[in-house]
Amino acid sequence: MKKFIIALSALILLYLAYDTARYRLGWYIDLKPDEPVTAFMTTDTQSIYIDRGSGPEPFIVKGVNLGVGLPDEWATDYAIDRETYLRWFGQMQEMGANTVRVYITLHDDFYNAFYEYNTAREEANEEPLWLIHGVWVNDYVQNSHRDAYDKDFLDAFIEDGRTLVDVLHGNKKISLGRGTGSGFYNKDVSRWVIGYILGVEWEDVTVAYTDHKYPDMAPYQGAYLSATEDASAFESMLAQVGDQIIEYESRRYKSQRLVAFSNWPTTDPFLYPEDITTFFMKCAQVDVEHIRAEDAFLAGQFVSYHVYPYYPDYLNYILNPTVMDRTPIWDGKAVISRVGTGPGTPIGSVLRRSDFYDETGAANTYLAYLRALRRHHTMPVVISEFGVSTGRGMAQIDRNTGRNQGHMSEQEQGQALVDCWRDITAANCAGGCVFTWQDEWFKRTWNTMHAVNLQRTPYWSDYQTNEQYFGLLSFDPGEEESVCYVDGDLSEWTEEDKLFDTGTRALSIKYDEKFIYLLAYEKGFANGQKMLYIPIDTTPKTGSTYCENFGLRFEDPVDFVLAIDGRDNSRLLVQERYEVLRAMFYHETHDADAYLDPPDADTPLFKPIDLMLQTATPLLTGNWQASSETYETGDLAYGNANPAAPDYDSLADFIFAGDYVELKLPWQLLNFADPSRMTIHDDYYENYGVDYITIDTMYLGLTDGAAQERTPLYPAALKGWGNRVAYHERLKASYDAMRRLWR
């Protein structure tokens, strides 16, 4: 018995040692050293090719980026399960996508589902879903290690790439770590992986610092990838990373895949006119033309860019040189002149004035930029991110085509995606990937992140933060349907929702993880033939009993006034003291300190609610200055907000129904920082910025403004929902638009 126990223990220890050596440490013995390396994906100067067994044929990437977020979960929770992945893969292919792109090594549920899905597709003799996989460099590493040759940057980059290779070949065990999935990866999905995109949207200062620190670095020379004599230190680093990952996969698994290095306009290879370079602080270039494929690299390279129609915004100034208030940027031959100095390819060498216009003659800087990329590169160009947001908030405007960063309906999003794809194909790119598959509640945007509790973003749907709504798939509140749809259907309102009812005037309220819903009744309202006002009090610190804008008086101080003035002139206004834009951006909008002369706590002035689009920036060369720019986000849109309606408008805020008006207000518009716990903004001028207080009641009223008496306010209890979020999936109208295009 003792010998048996000893033997069994030895076997267990031997297995554990084998398991650790193979799956965790990556040790292996090459039993077939002479086996040739293969590649089923190849490239030439313009196209990508796939060999399904009968020889190479052209392959256009019709892709969609897949994020990792779910409502009430952070990205690093890796909460998406196998069943969800399987459902989503089917929906992607039903849309016409042939490729999914992911950014990081995910939980093993993803790869198990991917294996199961594609195995079933092959057994049914159907086209599988292909995969482009990223190797991520997280924000902390990039921003804390400006030197890309620091071991915490470079060594981790290479090791993460090798780990991913093992993962895709079903040969790895890893534990949850920063930006890394976890699990036992024992499913070989490599035969469906067409390529890697290495890296992220590079911080320009990281690139510039690395290049500045190593100006005389000898170019990296590898067996598969090498840096050319023109390569910068950063480009040489990329060549080293790519070469070592290819070498590892070639040596251990006898196979290769396409390789690309992530890039975006901030670090594109172009040299712009001096005014543009200086004003927009264009300080770095990354040019993968300086990375050469050696003969041993059978698969080949492609070029990956994230390009959105509203960025780079400086192309607007190149197209309209008079805006710069300086000498024209275009010379007599209709190419860009007066370029600055430094590394890079002059943008004027790859663009003509005619390139800025599409076949209809309309200005299109997006198409122009894609043409510039395609002409510059001697390898296929894939636009690995393109998209627009359906968020109510907006952060940037495309002044030529109207494909803005936010404040676009789902129908407008769909048309913008179709137009972007047509531009991508017109520029002879090798395809692209829509950003992104699903909305992600945890995300933030520069012009709203000051207004919300960033530690609580997954627990509510912030319609003012555009970054959360790039998806083709929406997560709507409610397990099966939302508690309310602003569509004029009054049947979903009950007596329990009423705040008050006088017989001739009534107001009801309800809410969910995305909106506060209101139903106002006014006898004789007659589809907006008279004005209505809804005063709203949220904070006990500020507010006014008088609104001088409309001559309204209230029994208690209010912070907001909702003015219903027909279909085209309705808006939410905020008391000046409680205006977050003033508190946070007064220097940008008025060149003054908001805290030196703050509004009185009871000021009767109510202001439109605006969002920043562009902060003022002085031009360092010349006299031109870009002023700050805002837009009125408190302006309310009329329409039907029910996704089931044929005239559905996802941006609609209110609708008339006889003597009723039905409305929805996003939480942030009322200065809620975290409605899941009912925290709102405190007095800015007591805290010198945004701080929070918690409330359990808000107060609302209703008046037509005709009478002189003070409008009474009625209490509405607020409980929040904590971390327990209810939601259901819904494919947006943009999904249908892409399906019609790709199918």
Image (cartoon, rainbow, N blue to C red):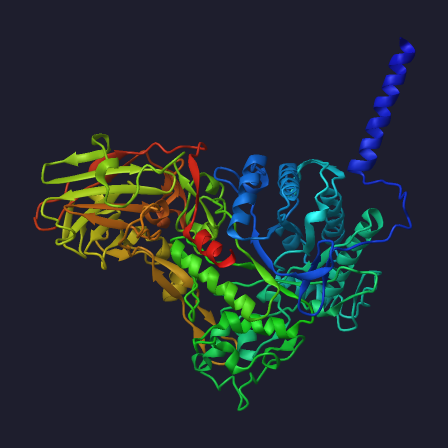
Q: Nearer the viewer, residue 148 or 516?
A: 516
Residue at x 59% of width, y 53% of height = 98
Which quadrant would residue 2 be assigned to in this image?
A: top right
Q: Is residue 380 above or below residue 640?
A: below
**Closer to us: 258 or 524:** 258
Q: Left of 238 or right of it: where is 629? A: left
Number of numbered callouts drawn: 0
Location of residue 630 by image quarter: bottom left
Query: Is residue 594 visible to us here?
Result: no
Residue 707 seen in this snapshot: yes
Which residue extends farthest top?
Answer: 1
Compared to residue 100, the image places residue 107 above or below, namely above
Q: Is residue 579 left or right of residue 9?
A: left
x, y percent for residue 425: 55, 67
The quarter holding residue 227 reads bottom right
- Up-down relation of residue 379 to residue 476 (above or below): below
Q: At which x and y percent is residue 191? A: 72, 48
Q: Is residue 186 left or right of residue 674?
A: right
